Image (spheres, helix red, strand yellow):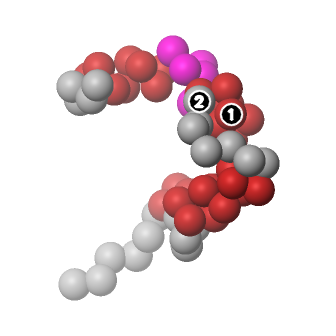
């Protein structure tokens, strides 16, 4: 059964997001991505890298 997407899902759902990000990085000649390279696009995590590390540790992501 189809469920209507929430406003949050609609806001953060973009088609081809990964492909678009990779293309933009390559346009800037970035092949090995660092956190510094993507810091400007990390708008979801208000506390920046700190919260990313916290979330990763909670799901046992290395």
Residue stretch in magenta: 45-50
Q: Position of residue 37 (x, y in %)?
A: 68, 33
Is 19 rendered above or below residue 59? below
Asked whether, in this view, residue 53 is left or right of residue 60, the answer is: right
User: Dividing the picture into quarters, in which one does residue 62 lie?
Assistant: top left
SS under mark 1: helix
According to the picture, the residue beneath numbered tag 1 turns out to be 37
- Viewed as shown, does residue 51 lie left or right of 22? left
Residue at screen point 78% across, 48% down:
28
The disc at residue 8 is: none
Give the labeled residue for mark 2.
34
Measuring from the top left, give residue 36's x and y in whole percent: 67, 26
Q: Residue at x 61, y 45 (%)?
A: 31
Q: Secondary structure at mark 2?
A: loop
Query: Would residue 3 appear left or right of 44 to someone viewing this image?
Result: left
For image coordinates 51% across by 15% down, the residue present is 50
């Amino acid at each position: 059964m189809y469920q209507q997407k929430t406003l949050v899902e609609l806001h953060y759902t973009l088609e081809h997001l990964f492909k678009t990000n990779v293309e933009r990085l390559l346009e800037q000649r970035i092949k090995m991505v660092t956190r510094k390279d993507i810091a400007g696009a990390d708008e979801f995590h208000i506390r920046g890298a700190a919260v990313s590390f916290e979330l990763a540790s909670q799901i046992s992501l290395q």
